[in-house]
Image (cartoon, rainbow, N blue to C red):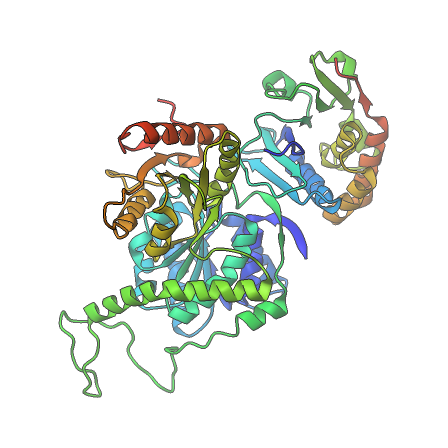
Amino acid sequence: MQIIESGNVAAALGVKLARAQVIAAFPITPQTPLTEKLSELIESGEMKAEYIPVESEHSALSVCIGAATAGARTFTATSANGLLYMHEQLHWAAGARLPIVMCVVNRGVGAPWNVWNDHQDSISQRDTGWIQIYVNDHQQIIDTVIKAFCIAEKVNIPVMVCYDGYILSHTYMPFYLPDQELVDCFLPPHKSVYALDPEDPRNINTVTLPEARVNVHGVLAHGYMELRYLLQEDLRKSIHTIAEVEERYSEVFNREGGAYLEEYRCRDASYIAVSMGSLSFQLRVAVDALREKGIRIGVAGVRLYRPFPDKAISNALSHANGIIVFEKGMSYGYMGPLASDIKSALYGNVNGNRKLPFVHNYILGLGGRNIRTRDLIDALRNSCKEGESTHMSDTLKWSGLKI
Amino acid sequence: MKEENIEIRWHGRGGQGTITAARIVAKAALRVGYTGVVMIPSFGTERRGAPVLTSLKISREKIYDLSEIEYPDIVVVLDHLLLDDINVTEGLKEGGILVINTPRSPHDYKYSGVKVATADVTAIAGEVGVTYGLVSSGIIGAFARASSLVGIHILTDVIKEELKERRPEENAQAATITYERTICSEVD
Protein backbone atom coordinates (compact mmCIF):
# COMPACT_ATOMS: atom_id res chain seq x y z
CA MET A 1 0.00 0.00 0.00
CA GLN A 2 1.34 3.41 -1.03
CA ILE A 3 0.64 6.33 1.31
CA ILE A 4 1.66 9.97 1.48
CA GLU A 5 3.03 11.04 4.83
CA SER A 6 5.86 13.05 6.33
CA GLY A 7 9.32 11.57 6.88
CA ASN A 8 8.81 11.62 10.64
CA VAL A 9 5.62 9.57 10.28
CA ALA A 10 7.45 7.15 7.95
CA ALA A 11 10.02 6.62 10.73
CA ALA A 12 7.33 6.15 13.40
CA LEU A 13 5.47 3.60 11.25
CA GLY A 14 8.77 1.73 10.76
CA VAL A 15 9.27 1.57 14.53
CA LYS A 16 5.69 0.29 14.94
CA LEU A 17 6.15 -2.37 12.25
CA ALA A 18 9.41 -3.44 13.92
CA ARG A 19 7.45 -3.95 17.14
CA ALA A 20 9.80 -1.92 19.32
CA GLN A 21 8.96 -2.63 22.97
CA VAL A 22 10.39 0.36 24.83
CA ILE A 23 10.57 3.94 23.57
CA ALA A 24 12.07 6.82 25.48
CA ALA A 25 12.56 10.15 23.82
CA PHE A 26 12.62 13.85 24.52
CA PRO A 27 11.07 16.17 21.93
CA ILE A 28 13.31 18.45 19.90
CA THR A 29 12.73 20.18 16.57
CA PRO A 30 12.61 18.72 13.89
CA GLN A 31 12.32 15.26 15.49
CA THR A 32 9.22 16.13 17.59
CA PRO A 33 6.47 14.84 15.24
CA LEU A 34 8.17 11.42 15.20
CA THR A 35 7.95 10.96 18.96
CA GLU A 36 4.47 12.51 19.03
CA LYS A 37 3.30 9.97 16.48
CA LEU A 38 4.78 7.10 18.48
CA SER A 39 3.16 8.30 21.70
CA GLU A 40 -0.19 8.58 19.85
CA LEU A 41 0.16 5.05 18.45
CA ILE A 42 0.94 3.67 21.91
CA GLU A 43 -1.76 5.71 23.67
CA SER A 44 -4.42 4.52 21.22
CA GLY A 45 -3.35 0.90 21.67
CA GLU A 46 -2.38 0.51 18.00
CA MET A 47 1.16 -0.20 19.11
CA LYS A 48 2.04 -2.34 22.09
CA ALA A 49 5.03 -0.71 23.73
CA GLU A 50 6.12 1.13 26.84
CA TYR A 51 6.58 4.87 26.19
CA ILE A 52 8.73 6.29 28.96
CA PRO A 53 8.62 10.09 29.22
CA VAL A 54 11.90 11.59 30.36
CA GLU A 55 13.20 15.05 31.24
CA SER A 56 16.18 15.09 28.87
CA GLU A 57 17.95 13.30 26.03
CA HIS A 58 20.62 12.01 28.41
CA SER A 59 17.87 10.26 30.34
CA ALA A 60 16.16 9.07 27.14
CA LEU A 61 19.21 7.12 26.07
CA SER A 62 19.84 5.99 29.65
CA VAL A 63 16.35 4.49 29.75
CA CYS A 64 17.03 2.76 26.43
CA ILE A 65 20.30 1.41 27.81
CA GLY A 66 18.44 -0.01 30.83
CA ALA A 67 15.65 -1.48 28.72
CA ALA A 68 18.05 -2.98 26.16
CA THR A 69 20.11 -4.48 28.99
CA ALA A 70 16.92 -6.18 30.15
CA GLY A 71 16.54 -7.59 26.63
CA ALA A 72 13.86 -5.29 25.20
CA ARG A 73 13.81 -3.97 21.64
CA THR A 74 14.32 -0.25 22.21
CA PHE A 75 14.11 2.94 20.18
CA THR A 76 14.83 6.61 20.64
CA ALA A 77 15.17 9.65 18.39
CA THR A 78 16.67 13.09 18.60
CA SER A 79 18.32 15.97 16.73
CA ALA A 80 21.25 18.36 17.08
CA ASN A 81 21.87 19.55 20.64
CA GLY A 82 19.71 16.71 21.94
CA LEU A 83 22.06 14.19 20.35
CA LEU A 84 25.03 16.00 21.83
CA TYR A 85 23.42 15.89 25.25
CA MET A 86 23.37 12.07 24.81
CA HIS A 87 27.04 12.01 23.93
CA GLU A 88 28.28 10.23 27.05
CA GLN A 89 25.57 7.59 26.77
CA LEU A 90 26.26 7.08 23.05
CA HIS A 91 29.69 5.76 23.98
CA TRP A 92 28.14 3.72 26.76
CA ALA A 93 25.50 2.09 24.54
CA ALA A 94 28.16 1.05 22.00
CA GLY A 95 30.65 -0.09 24.64
CA ALA A 96 27.92 -2.12 26.38
CA ARG A 97 27.07 -3.64 22.96
CA LEU A 98 23.35 -2.84 23.15
CA PRO A 99 21.26 -3.15 19.97
CA ILE A 100 19.45 0.19 20.34
CA VAL A 101 18.08 1.92 17.25
CA MET A 102 17.92 5.71 17.10
CA CYS A 103 16.71 8.09 14.42
CA VAL A 104 18.77 11.23 14.15
CA VAL A 105 16.75 13.91 12.38
CA ASN A 106 19.72 15.92 11.16
CA ARG A 107 19.88 19.56 12.24
CA GLY A 108 22.58 22.21 12.61
CA VAL A 109 24.24 22.56 16.00
CA GLY A 110 24.33 25.82 18.00
CA ALA A 111 25.85 28.32 18.45
CA PRO A 112 24.34 30.33 16.92
CA TRP A 113 20.96 28.70 17.48
CA ASN A 114 19.51 27.05 14.38
CA VAL A 115 16.81 24.45 13.87
CA TRP A 116 17.34 23.70 10.17
CA ASN A 117 19.11 20.91 8.39
CA ASP A 118 22.75 20.02 8.11
CA HIS A 119 24.74 16.93 9.16
CA GLN A 120 27.00 18.35 11.87
CA ASP A 121 25.09 16.66 14.69
CA SER A 122 25.48 13.02 13.66
CA ILE A 123 28.79 13.53 11.85
CA SER A 124 30.32 14.83 15.08
CA GLN A 125 29.23 11.55 16.78
CA ARG A 126 30.79 9.24 14.21
CA ASP A 127 33.51 8.01 16.57
CA THR A 128 31.20 6.77 19.32
CA GLY A 129 31.12 3.21 17.97
CA TRP A 130 27.58 3.34 16.55
CA ILE A 131 26.66 2.19 13.09
CA GLN A 132 25.52 5.20 11.05
CA ILE A 133 23.25 4.92 8.00
CA TYR A 134 22.10 7.95 5.99
CA VAL A 135 18.90 7.78 3.95
CA ASN A 136 17.59 9.75 0.98
CA ASP A 137 13.80 9.53 0.98
CA HIS A 138 10.79 8.28 2.93
CA GLN A 139 10.90 4.77 1.51
CA GLN A 140 14.45 4.45 2.73
CA ILE A 141 13.49 5.89 6.14
CA ILE A 142 10.80 3.28 6.85
CA ASP A 143 12.78 0.40 5.31
CA THR A 144 16.02 1.35 7.05
CA VAL A 145 14.39 1.64 10.48
CA ILE A 146 13.21 -1.98 10.11
CA LYS A 147 16.60 -3.15 8.79
CA ALA A 148 18.39 -1.24 11.56
CA PHE A 149 16.80 -3.40 14.28
CA CYS A 150 17.81 -6.51 12.38
CA ILE A 151 21.42 -5.31 11.97
CA ALA A 152 21.72 -4.07 15.57
CA GLU A 153 20.44 -7.35 17.00
CA LYS A 154 22.69 -9.47 14.78
CA VAL A 155 25.92 -7.66 15.66
CA ASN A 156 25.03 -6.23 19.10
CA ILE A 157 25.95 -2.71 18.07
CA PRO A 158 23.57 0.28 18.20
CA VAL A 159 22.46 1.88 14.93
CA MET A 160 21.69 5.50 14.02
CA VAL A 161 19.36 6.06 11.10
CA CYS A 162 20.09 9.61 9.96
CA TYR A 163 17.69 11.65 7.83
CA ASP A 164 17.54 15.30 6.88
CA GLY A 165 15.57 17.56 9.19
CA TYR A 166 12.68 19.39 7.47
CA ILE A 167 13.82 18.41 3.96
CA LEU A 168 12.76 14.83 4.73
CA SER A 169 11.25 14.98 8.22
CA HIS A 170 8.52 17.50 7.32
CA THR A 171 8.18 16.85 3.58
CA TYR A 172 5.29 14.70 2.38
CA MET A 173 5.91 12.11 -0.32
CA PRO A 174 4.53 8.70 -1.26
CA PHE A 175 6.05 5.49 0.03
CA TYR A 176 5.05 1.86 0.36
CA LEU A 177 4.06 0.62 3.78
CA PRO A 178 5.71 -2.78 4.36
CA ASP A 179 3.31 -5.58 5.21
CA GLN A 180 3.30 -6.43 8.94
CA GLU A 181 3.39 -10.20 8.33
CA LEU A 182 6.44 -9.87 6.12
CA VAL A 183 8.14 -7.62 8.68
CA ASP A 184 7.43 -10.18 11.40
CA CYS A 185 8.99 -12.84 9.22
CA PHE A 186 12.01 -10.65 8.41
CA LEU A 187 12.48 -9.47 11.98
CA PRO A 188 11.53 -12.10 14.59
CA PRO A 189 11.22 -11.11 18.27
CA HIS A 190 14.51 -10.06 19.84
CA LYS A 191 16.30 -12.61 22.01
CA SER A 192 19.19 -11.00 23.83
CA VAL A 193 22.15 -13.25 24.68
CA TYR A 194 23.12 -11.13 27.69
CA ALA A 195 19.72 -10.04 29.01
CA LEU A 196 19.49 -9.38 32.73
CA ASP A 197 18.03 -12.35 34.55
CA PRO A 198 17.13 -12.26 38.27
CA GLU A 199 17.69 -16.04 38.36
CA ASP A 200 21.24 -15.55 37.18
CA PRO A 201 22.53 -12.33 38.73
CA ARG A 202 25.78 -10.79 37.52
CA ASN A 203 27.69 -7.54 37.29
CA ILE A 204 27.60 -5.79 33.94
CA ASN A 205 30.07 -3.13 32.85
CA THR A 206 31.83 -2.81 36.17
CA VAL A 207 35.18 -1.09 36.55
CA THR A 208 37.89 -2.63 34.43
CA LEU A 209 41.57 -2.24 35.31
CA PRO A 210 44.28 -1.53 32.73
CA GLU A 211 45.19 -5.23 32.75
CA ALA A 212 42.85 -8.16 32.05
CA ARG A 213 42.11 -10.23 35.15
CA VAL A 214 40.47 -13.50 36.08
CA ASN A 215 36.75 -13.60 36.76
CA VAL A 216 34.93 -15.32 39.64
CA HIS A 217 35.31 -18.65 37.84
CA GLY A 218 39.06 -18.24 37.69
CA VAL A 219 39.02 -17.68 33.91
CA LEU A 220 40.97 -14.80 32.37
CA ALA A 221 38.29 -12.30 31.28
CA HIS A 222 38.50 -9.53 28.71
CA GLY A 223 39.72 -6.20 30.02
CA TYR A 224 38.81 -2.77 28.72
CA MET A 225 41.23 -2.91 25.82
CA GLU A 226 40.07 -6.36 24.66
CA LEU A 227 36.43 -5.27 24.74
CA ARG A 228 37.23 -2.14 22.75
CA TYR A 229 39.27 -4.20 20.26
CA LEU A 230 36.28 -6.49 19.81
CA LEU A 231 33.99 -3.52 19.20
CA GLN A 232 36.26 -2.41 16.35
CA GLU A 233 36.58 -5.95 14.96
CA ASP A 234 32.84 -6.51 15.10
CA LEU A 235 32.13 -3.14 13.49
CA ARG A 236 34.42 -4.06 10.60
CA LYS A 237 32.75 -7.49 10.30
CA SER A 238 29.33 -5.85 10.41
CA ILE A 239 30.04 -4.36 6.96
CA HIS A 240 29.27 -7.84 5.55
CA THR A 241 26.31 -8.41 7.86
CA ILE A 242 24.79 -5.11 6.74
CA ALA A 243 25.03 -6.20 3.09
CA GLU A 244 23.42 -9.55 3.95
CA VAL A 245 20.56 -7.85 5.75
CA GLU A 246 20.10 -5.50 2.78
CA GLU A 247 20.00 -8.43 0.39
CA ARG A 248 17.47 -10.33 2.46
CA TYR A 249 15.30 -7.24 2.83
CA SER A 250 15.28 -6.62 -0.90
CA GLU A 251 14.30 -10.28 -1.46
CA VAL A 252 11.43 -10.18 1.03
CA PHE A 253 10.12 -6.73 0.10
CA ASN A 254 11.19 -6.63 -3.54
CA ARG A 255 13.04 -3.35 -3.22
CA GLU A 256 16.32 -2.43 -4.85
CA GLY A 257 18.91 -0.63 -2.82
CA GLY A 258 22.59 -0.39 -2.06
CA ALA A 259 23.76 -1.23 1.45
CA TYR A 260 26.91 0.89 1.14
CA LEU A 261 26.28 3.41 -1.57
CA GLU A 262 23.81 4.10 -4.34
CA GLU A 263 25.34 4.75 -7.71
CA TYR A 264 23.60 6.72 -10.44
CA ARG A 265 25.11 6.93 -13.95
CA CYS A 266 28.53 6.06 -12.49
CA ARG A 267 29.52 3.13 -14.69
CA ASP A 268 31.10 5.12 -17.52
CA ALA A 269 31.58 8.32 -15.54
CA SER A 270 34.79 10.33 -15.67
CA TYR A 271 33.59 12.40 -12.73
CA ILE A 272 31.59 11.28 -9.73
CA ALA A 273 29.78 13.52 -7.27
CA VAL A 274 29.51 12.06 -3.75
CA SER A 275 27.16 13.03 -0.97
CA MET A 276 24.94 11.71 1.83
CA GLY A 277 21.22 12.03 2.47
CA SER A 278 18.61 13.76 0.32
CA LEU A 279 21.33 15.87 -1.35
CA SER A 280 22.60 12.78 -3.17
CA PHE A 281 19.15 12.48 -4.81
CA GLN A 282 19.12 16.18 -5.73
CA LEU A 283 22.53 15.69 -7.34
CA ARG A 284 20.92 13.20 -9.74
CA VAL A 285 19.03 16.10 -11.30
CA ALA A 286 22.30 18.05 -11.69
CA VAL A 287 23.98 14.98 -13.19
CA ASP A 288 21.15 14.57 -15.74
CA ALA A 289 21.56 18.21 -16.79
CA LEU A 290 25.34 17.86 -17.22
CA ARG A 291 24.99 14.57 -19.12
CA GLU A 292 22.83 16.44 -21.61
CA LYS A 293 25.79 18.78 -22.12
CA GLY A 294 28.02 15.80 -22.83
CA ILE A 295 29.85 15.63 -19.48
CA ARG A 296 30.35 12.07 -18.34
CA ILE A 297 29.34 12.38 -14.74
CA GLY A 298 27.51 10.32 -12.13
CA VAL A 299 26.62 10.50 -8.45
CA ALA A 300 27.22 8.09 -5.60
CA GLY A 301 25.19 8.54 -2.42
CA VAL A 302 26.94 7.08 0.61
CA ARG A 303 24.43 5.17 2.75
CA LEU A 304 26.69 3.47 5.29
CA TYR A 305 29.06 5.95 6.90
CA ARG A 306 30.19 3.98 9.96
CA PRO A 307 31.58 1.38 9.67
CA PHE A 308 33.06 3.00 6.58
CA PRO A 309 32.81 0.58 3.63
CA ASP A 310 36.18 1.77 2.33
CA LYS A 311 36.78 -1.05 -0.16
CA ALA A 312 33.37 -0.72 -1.81
CA ILE A 313 33.72 3.06 -1.96
CA SER A 314 37.24 2.95 -3.32
CA ASN A 315 36.22 0.38 -5.95
CA ALA A 316 33.28 2.51 -7.00
CA LEU A 317 35.28 5.73 -7.27
CA SER A 318 38.90 4.99 -8.14
CA HIS A 319 38.26 4.58 -11.89
CA ALA A 320 37.10 8.21 -12.21
CA ASN A 321 39.30 11.19 -13.11
CA GLY A 322 37.73 13.29 -10.43
CA ILE A 323 35.55 13.01 -7.36
CA ILE A 324 33.53 15.95 -6.07
CA VAL A 325 32.34 15.57 -2.49
CA PHE A 326 29.43 17.71 -1.26
CA GLU A 327 29.03 17.88 2.50
CA LYS A 328 26.71 19.44 5.07
CA GLY A 329 29.19 18.91 7.88
CA MET A 330 32.75 19.83 8.82
CA SER A 331 35.69 18.57 10.72
CA TYR A 332 36.50 22.11 11.81
CA GLY A 333 40.12 22.96 11.25
CA TYR A 334 40.54 20.44 8.41
CA MET A 335 37.94 19.58 5.75
CA GLY A 336 34.67 17.76 5.24
CA PRO A 337 34.88 14.41 7.06
CA LEU A 338 33.48 12.42 4.12
CA ALA A 339 36.08 13.89 1.73
CA SER A 340 38.79 13.04 4.21
CA ASP A 341 37.48 9.47 4.60
CA ILE A 342 37.25 9.03 0.83
CA LYS A 343 40.83 10.20 0.35
CA SER A 344 41.94 7.73 2.97
CA ALA A 345 39.96 4.92 1.28
CA LEU A 346 41.51 5.73 -2.11
CA TYR A 347 45.00 5.47 -0.65
CA GLY A 348 44.36 1.78 -0.09
CA ASN A 349 43.71 1.40 -3.80
CA VAL A 350 47.01 2.79 -5.02
CA ASN A 351 48.48 0.31 -7.45
CA GLY A 352 51.43 0.84 -9.76
CA ASN A 353 51.55 4.12 -11.64
CA ARG A 354 47.82 4.59 -11.94
CA LYS A 355 46.93 8.15 -11.10
CA LEU A 356 44.38 8.57 -8.37
CA PRO A 357 41.38 10.82 -9.05
CA PHE A 358 41.40 14.38 -7.73
CA VAL A 359 39.08 14.97 -4.79
CA HIS A 360 37.30 18.30 -4.57
CA ASN A 361 35.33 19.16 -1.48
CA TYR A 362 32.37 21.56 -1.26
CA ILE A 363 30.71 22.54 2.01
CA LEU A 364 27.10 23.68 1.55
CA GLY A 365 23.65 23.85 3.08
CA LEU A 366 24.83 24.54 6.63
CA GLY A 367 22.03 25.54 8.97
CA GLY A 368 19.46 24.88 6.25
CA ARG A 369 20.94 27.27 3.64
CA ASN A 370 18.96 26.53 0.48
CA ILE A 371 20.83 24.36 -2.01
CA ARG A 372 19.84 25.30 -5.54
CA THR A 373 20.22 22.67 -8.22
CA ARG A 374 21.73 25.23 -10.58
CA ASP A 375 24.45 25.96 -8.01
CA LEU A 376 25.22 22.25 -7.87
CA ILE A 377 25.45 22.20 -11.67
CA ASP A 378 27.84 25.19 -11.64
CA ALA A 379 30.05 23.65 -8.95
CA LEU A 380 30.21 20.33 -10.78
CA ARG A 381 30.92 21.97 -14.12
CA ASN A 382 33.76 24.04 -12.61
CA SER A 383 35.28 21.03 -10.94
CA CYS A 384 35.15 18.98 -14.15
CA LYS A 385 36.65 21.82 -16.19
CA GLU A 386 39.41 22.82 -13.80
CA GLY A 387 40.25 19.30 -12.81
CA GLU A 388 40.72 18.48 -16.48
CA SER A 389 43.15 21.29 -17.27
CA THR A 390 45.20 21.94 -14.15
CA HIS A 391 46.07 20.62 -10.77
CA MET A 392 43.28 22.61 -9.24
CA SER A 393 44.10 23.01 -5.59
CA ASP A 394 42.07 20.75 -3.41
CA THR A 395 41.42 23.48 -0.86
CA LEU A 396 37.98 23.44 0.61
CA LYS A 397 35.30 25.23 -1.38
CA TRP A 398 32.01 26.63 -0.11
CA SER A 399 28.85 26.76 -2.18
CA GLY A 400 26.02 29.22 -1.49
CA LEU A 401 28.20 31.34 0.81
CA LYS A 402 27.27 35.04 0.92
CA ILE A 403 30.38 36.70 2.29
CA MET B 1 14.53 18.12 -15.70
CA LYS B 2 11.32 16.55 -16.95
CA GLU B 3 8.95 18.80 -18.89
CA GLU B 4 5.89 17.35 -17.22
CA ASN B 5 6.90 18.60 -13.77
CA ILE B 6 4.31 20.94 -12.33
CA GLU B 7 5.49 23.21 -9.56
CA ILE B 8 3.02 24.99 -7.30
CA ARG B 9 3.95 27.47 -4.60
CA TRP B 10 1.43 28.18 -1.85
CA HIS B 11 1.49 31.41 0.18
CA GLY B 12 -0.65 31.82 3.25
CA ARG B 13 -0.58 32.84 6.87
CA GLY B 14 0.07 30.58 9.85
CA GLY B 15 -3.28 29.07 10.92
CA GLN B 16 -5.10 29.39 7.58
CA GLY B 17 -4.45 25.82 6.50
CA THR B 18 -1.85 26.40 3.78
CA ILE B 19 0.01 23.16 4.43
CA THR B 20 -3.25 21.24 4.87
CA ALA B 21 -4.45 22.48 1.47
CA ALA B 22 -1.21 21.54 -0.30
CA ARG B 23 -1.20 18.14 1.43
CA ILE B 24 -4.75 17.39 0.27
CA VAL B 25 -3.87 18.29 -3.32
CA ALA B 26 -0.74 16.07 -3.04
CA LYS B 27 -2.85 13.08 -1.93
CA ALA B 28 -5.40 13.65 -4.68
CA ALA B 29 -2.64 13.97 -7.29
CA LEU B 30 -1.16 10.61 -6.25
CA ARG B 31 -4.63 9.10 -6.54
CA VAL B 32 -5.03 10.24 -10.13
CA GLY B 33 -1.70 8.74 -11.14
CA TYR B 34 1.00 11.31 -10.44
CA THR B 35 3.49 8.95 -8.78
CA GLY B 36 5.95 11.75 -8.16
CA VAL B 37 4.39 14.04 -5.56
CA VAL B 38 6.31 15.98 -2.94
CA MET B 39 5.06 18.70 -0.62
CA ILE B 40 7.92 20.57 1.01
CA PRO B 41 6.90 23.12 3.65
CA SER B 42 9.38 25.97 4.12
CA PHE B 43 9.77 26.45 7.82
CA GLY B 44 10.78 29.75 9.27
CA THR B 45 9.73 31.14 12.59
CA GLU B 46 6.04 30.24 12.22
CA ARG B 47 3.31 31.65 14.32
CA ARG B 48 -0.33 32.44 13.71
CA GLY B 49 -0.79 35.19 11.16
CA ALA B 50 2.82 35.21 9.91
CA PRO B 51 3.43 34.52 6.22
CA VAL B 52 4.16 30.83 5.44
CA LEU B 53 4.85 29.06 2.19
CA THR B 54 5.04 25.53 0.92
CA SER B 55 6.24 23.95 -2.33
CA LEU B 56 4.21 21.26 -4.08
CA LYS B 57 5.82 19.41 -6.99
CA ILE B 58 3.80 17.02 -9.11
CA SER B 59 5.17 14.68 -11.77
CA ARG B 60 4.52 11.36 -13.49
CA GLU B 61 7.94 10.19 -12.25
CA LYS B 62 9.71 10.16 -8.89
CA ILE B 63 10.95 13.60 -7.84
CA TYR B 64 14.56 13.77 -6.66
CA ASP B 65 14.88 17.52 -6.15
CA LEU B 66 13.46 18.68 -2.81
CA SER B 67 14.79 22.23 -3.02
CA GLU B 68 12.48 25.24 -2.87
CA ILE B 69 10.55 26.05 -6.04
CA GLU B 70 12.18 28.95 -7.90
CA TYR B 71 10.08 29.04 -11.07
CA PRO B 72 6.53 27.96 -10.23
CA ASP B 73 3.90 27.12 -12.83
CA ILE B 74 1.17 28.04 -10.38
CA VAL B 75 1.12 30.31 -7.33
CA VAL B 76 -1.73 30.04 -4.82
CA VAL B 77 -2.32 32.88 -2.35
CA LEU B 78 -4.63 32.20 0.60
CA ASP B 79 -4.83 35.84 1.71
CA HIS B 80 -4.84 38.72 -0.80
CA LEU B 81 -3.31 41.07 1.80
CA LEU B 82 -0.07 39.11 1.37
CA LEU B 83 0.23 40.73 -2.06
CA ASP B 84 1.18 43.98 -0.28
CA ASP B 85 4.03 42.38 1.66
CA ILE B 86 5.41 39.62 -0.52
CA ASN B 87 6.34 39.39 -4.18
CA VAL B 88 4.23 36.26 -4.61
CA THR B 89 4.73 36.10 -8.39
CA GLU B 90 8.52 35.94 -8.06
CA GLY B 91 9.77 33.45 -10.65
CA LEU B 92 6.22 32.66 -11.89
CA LYS B 93 6.56 31.28 -15.39
CA GLU B 94 5.27 33.13 -18.47
CA GLY B 95 1.69 31.96 -18.97
CA GLY B 96 1.56 30.72 -15.37
CA ILE B 97 -1.46 30.83 -13.07
CA LEU B 98 -2.00 33.01 -10.00
CA VAL B 99 -4.87 31.90 -7.74
CA ILE B 100 -5.94 34.42 -5.08
CA ASN B 101 -8.44 34.31 -2.22
CA THR B 102 -9.88 37.81 -2.55
CA PRO B 103 -13.23 39.60 -2.77
CA ARG B 104 -11.96 41.35 -5.90
CA SER B 105 -12.19 40.36 -9.55
CA PRO B 106 -9.19 39.04 -11.52
CA HIS B 107 -9.34 42.17 -13.67
CA ASP B 108 -8.42 44.28 -10.64
CA TYR B 109 -4.98 42.66 -10.69
CA LYS B 110 -2.36 43.67 -13.19
CA TYR B 111 0.10 40.89 -13.75
CA SER B 112 1.37 40.64 -17.29
CA GLY B 113 1.72 37.23 -18.88
CA VAL B 114 -0.17 35.54 -16.07
CA LYS B 115 -3.63 34.03 -15.81
CA VAL B 116 -5.31 35.31 -12.64
CA ALA B 117 -8.08 33.37 -10.88
CA THR B 118 -9.96 34.79 -7.93
CA ALA B 119 -12.63 33.67 -5.47
CA ASP B 120 -13.84 35.06 -2.16
CA VAL B 121 -12.95 31.89 -0.29
CA THR B 122 -13.21 33.50 3.14
CA ALA B 123 -16.82 34.57 2.49
CA ILE B 124 -17.83 31.22 0.97
CA ALA B 125 -16.29 29.33 3.90
CA GLY B 126 -18.37 31.51 6.23
CA GLU B 127 -21.55 30.82 4.22
CA VAL B 128 -21.26 27.04 4.45
CA GLY B 129 -20.23 26.96 8.11
CA VAL B 130 -16.52 26.27 8.00
CA THR B 131 -14.67 27.73 11.02
CA TYR B 132 -14.04 31.40 10.25
CA GLY B 133 -10.60 32.02 8.78
CA LEU B 134 -9.97 28.47 7.62
CA VAL B 135 -9.68 28.61 3.85
CA SER B 136 -7.75 25.41 3.09
CA SER B 137 -10.72 23.55 1.60
CA GLY B 138 -12.16 26.50 -0.35
CA ILE B 139 -8.86 27.46 -1.94
CA ILE B 140 -8.59 23.91 -3.28
CA GLY B 141 -11.79 24.53 -5.25
CA ALA B 142 -10.32 27.69 -6.78
CA PHE B 143 -7.08 25.86 -7.54
CA ALA B 144 -8.98 23.00 -9.23
CA ARG B 145 -10.97 25.40 -11.39
CA ALA B 146 -7.94 27.46 -12.45
CA SER B 147 -5.55 24.56 -13.10
CA SER B 148 -7.76 21.60 -14.19
CA LEU B 149 -4.97 19.45 -12.82
CA VAL B 150 -7.04 17.23 -10.53
CA GLY B 151 -10.81 16.78 -10.72
CA ILE B 152 -12.95 18.51 -8.09
CA HIS B 153 -14.71 15.26 -7.10
CA ILE B 154 -11.47 13.53 -6.21
CA LEU B 155 -10.37 16.62 -4.30
CA THR B 156 -13.61 16.73 -2.30
CA ASP B 157 -13.26 13.00 -1.54
CA VAL B 158 -9.78 13.60 -0.14
CA ILE B 159 -11.00 16.70 1.77
CA LYS B 160 -13.64 14.55 3.50
CA GLU B 161 -11.05 11.91 4.41
CA GLU B 162 -8.39 14.32 5.60
CA LEU B 163 -10.74 16.57 7.55
CA LYS B 164 -13.00 13.80 8.84
CA GLU B 165 -12.93 15.21 12.36
CA ARG B 166 -13.11 18.84 11.25
CA ARG B 167 -16.49 19.42 9.51
CA PRO B 168 -15.82 17.26 6.44
CA GLU B 169 -19.13 17.98 4.67
CA GLU B 170 -18.91 21.74 5.15
CA ASN B 171 -15.30 21.75 3.91
CA ALA B 172 -16.17 19.68 0.84
CA GLN B 173 -19.04 22.05 0.14
CA ALA B 174 -16.72 25.07 0.50
CA ALA B 175 -14.47 23.54 -2.17
CA THR B 176 -17.36 22.76 -4.52
CA ILE B 177 -18.98 26.18 -4.22
CA THR B 178 -15.65 27.97 -4.60
CA TYR B 179 -14.94 25.83 -7.66
CA GLU B 180 -18.21 27.05 -9.19
CA ARG B 181 -17.67 30.71 -8.30
CA THR B 182 -14.02 31.07 -9.28
CA ILE B 183 -13.44 33.64 -12.01
CA CYS B 184 -10.45 33.26 -14.29
CA SER B 185 -8.90 35.90 -16.53
CA GLU B 186 -7.09 35.04 -19.73
CA VAL B 187 -3.36 35.58 -19.94
CA ASP B 188 -2.86 39.33 -20.06
Q: Nearer the viewer, residue A217 or B48?
A: A217
Residue under the image location 79 percent in, 40 percent down: B171
Quadrant where the C terminus of chain A is found in the figure: top left
Image-quadrant location for residue A39:
bottom right
Inspect this view and state whether residue A53 appears. Answer: no
Left or right of A254, for residue A216: left
Residue A107 placement (x, y as % from top left): 42, 43
> In the displayed structure, does residue A51 sit left or right of residue A47?
left
Q: Position of residue B76 (x, y in %)?
A: 68, 27
Looking at the rendering, in which quadrant would you find the N terminus of chain A?
A: bottom right
Q: Is residue A217 left or right of residue A269?
A: left
- Pinpoint residue A158: horizontal percent, then vertical percent: 39, 63
Give above or below for A70 relative to A118: below
Say which of A268 and A101 sits in front. Answer: A268
Q: Residue at 30% of width from left, 60% of height from top?
A: A91
Q: Is residue A345 above or below residue A369?
A: below
